[in-house]
Amino acid sequence: MTCADRRGRHERADGRRDRLLRAIALFKFGKAALLATVALGALELLRPAVAERAQAWLSALSLHSERAELQRLLAGLAGVSPGRLAELGVGSFLYGALFAIEGVGLWLGRRWAESVTVVTTLSFVPFEVHHLLRHPRATGASALALNLAVAAILIRRLRRGRAEGDGAGR
């Protein structure tokens, strides 16, 4: 096998790995955008006029809904205090910023971003499992499976990188 053949095969493998990292980065960017939306919505509800309008919409929606689960959710949202809304808004911004930082680092192929993503992703698995056990849903199971797959992929990449000795300066 010639040097060019080996280099071409290595570049194709790197291209696949880069596409996978970019896909994970896009997933992180999507989560960051969703959390930014939640944060803005929560902080916007601190304004009295917006809160009154939202309360009217929630009341109208709960009257027209026959689903008990939706009515419980809407009743819970209606009773959220301004302090809790502020906490939700700030927490969502901070968590979204973490996802955005992870996404940028992964997009740029930085080894530190892979490590940070593994740690943050796995740190929430016990909470996801607990929630899934209390409220079994296909969406919860899918989210848990996706997060575990992301962590497994990145752990494999980190181990391979350490074994190959590449990325020491990344």
Image (cartoon, rainbow, N blue to C red):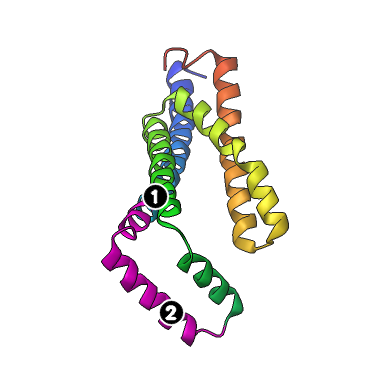
Position of residue 101 relative to residue 91, above or below, is above
Tag 1's secondary structure? helix
Residue type at mark 1?
Ala
Circle 1 is placed at which residue position? 86
Residue type at mark 2?
Ser
Q: Marks 1 and 2, how far apart in space?
A: 22 Å
Report x, y in % for residue 32: 39, 46
Task: Confirm whether the magenta stretch covers residue 107.
Answer: no
Position of residue 95 relative to residue 50, above or below, is above
Question: Where are the magenta residues, as a range?
Answer: 39-66
Left or right position of 127 against 30: right
Q: Quadrant of the C terminus?
A: top left
Tag 2's secondary structure? helix
- How many numbered callouts? 2
Circle 2 is placed at which residue position? 59
| Viewer-nearest residue: 105 or 50 | 50
Look at 67% across and 42% down and name the residue there: 126
